Every structure is written in C-alpha cells, then in structure tokens.
Image: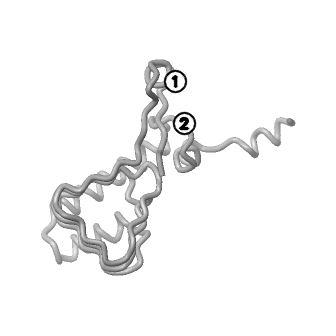
Amino acid sequence: MTLMALIMTTKTEREKMLAGEAYKAWDEELVKARLNCRKTLKLLNDSIPNTDQWKQAQEALIPNRSGNLYIEPPFRCDYGENIHVGNNFYANFNCVILDVNVVEIGDNVLFAPNVQIYTAGHPLDVKGRVEEEVEFGLR
C-alpha cells in the first residue's frame, strides 16, 4: 500500500467510534464535541420547558429529529448529534442516552422517567482499558 493510499484510508477517531471500532475517547475532536454538548445540556437543564431557551437548546442538542420533541430536564447525553428521533418524542425526567454510536428512536415514542440507553463499550482486558486507552460504540 502506498503512503497516499494509507493516508486516504486512515479513519478519524469519530469515524472509528461510529463504525463500532476501537477509538480513543480523549481525541481532541471528540473532547471538544462532548464539551460543546455539555454547554447545550446546561442550557437545557437550567431552562423551564416551553420557553425559548428550552426550545433552542433541544433543537441544538438533537439536530437529527423528524418533528415534535419534548425533553424534560434533566437530560444527559455524550454528543446529541448521534441521537436520531422520529416525530412526537417525549423523554421524561432523568433520561440518559450515551450516544457514542447512533441511537435511533422512532415516531410516537414516550420514555418513562430514568430511561437510560448506553451505546458505550469498554474492553474487558486490562491492555485495552489501561494501555491502549480505547473504547468502542455499540449499535
């Protein structure tokens, strides 16, 4: 394989994460994305439902939605952009979605309080966890 071919086939850590491959969670791009998500979560979680701030925070947090969206604060997620929501979605209090991989939620879905969805995975061996410092996303 030529050097150019190798460069062209090298995946970013985000691409690896979304492909379900081992990736470095402390990659600069991913850390920045999670921090941006935390800022939006703070706006959402500090807001009153049905206010402009709440609506804007929901829209910024979950850009991949088909229609009506109602999230009761507090809500937690890793990125937000990996959550795909259909029309008429409702998340009750204390919902957690660890979206290191794509989470697809259909139309007319209502989550009870404390619903938690985890796509994050960690190696079971010490080498993967400690030495290689990798994670993976499950879909």
> Quick one: label 2 or label 1, which is nearer the N terminus?
2
Q: Amino acid at mark 1?
A: Glu
Residue at the extreme left of the image, as rendered:
48
Q: How many marks?
A: 2
The residue that mark 2 highlights is 22
Above or below residue 26? Residue 8 is: below
Q: Amino acid at mark 2?
A: Ala
Residue at the extreme right of the image, as rendered:
2
Secondary structure, mark 1, is loop
Q: Residue at x 30, y 72 (%)?
A: 109
The residue that mark 1 highlights is 132
Image spot of residue 136 (x, y percent): 49, 39
Name the image colouring. Answer: one colour
Image spot of residue 9 (x, y percent): 74, 44
Is 57 on the left-hand or right-hand side of 65? left
Image spot of residue 134 (x, y percent): 49, 31
Image spot of residue 79 (x, y percent): 39, 53
Q: Mark on residue 76?
A: none
Q: Are marks 2 and 1 in contact (CB under 8 Å)?
A: yes
Above or below residue 40? Residue 60 is: below
Is 83 on the left-hand or right-hand side of 74? right
* The one of 9 and 4 positioned closer to us in this rendering: 9
Q: Residue at x 41, y 78 (%)?
A: 66
Q: Residue at x 36, y 53 (%)?
A: 36
Is 33 on the left-hand or right-hand side of 93? right
Secondary structure, mark 2, is loop
Q: Residue at x 38, y 67 (%)?
A: 105
Q: CA distance from mark 2 to mark 1?
A: 10 Å
Above or below residue 1? Residue 137 is: below
| The image quarter in which residue 1 lies | top right
Q: Give the class, few, some or many, for how many residues have Cα within 10 Å of label 1's Cα (few <14, many ≥20).
A: few
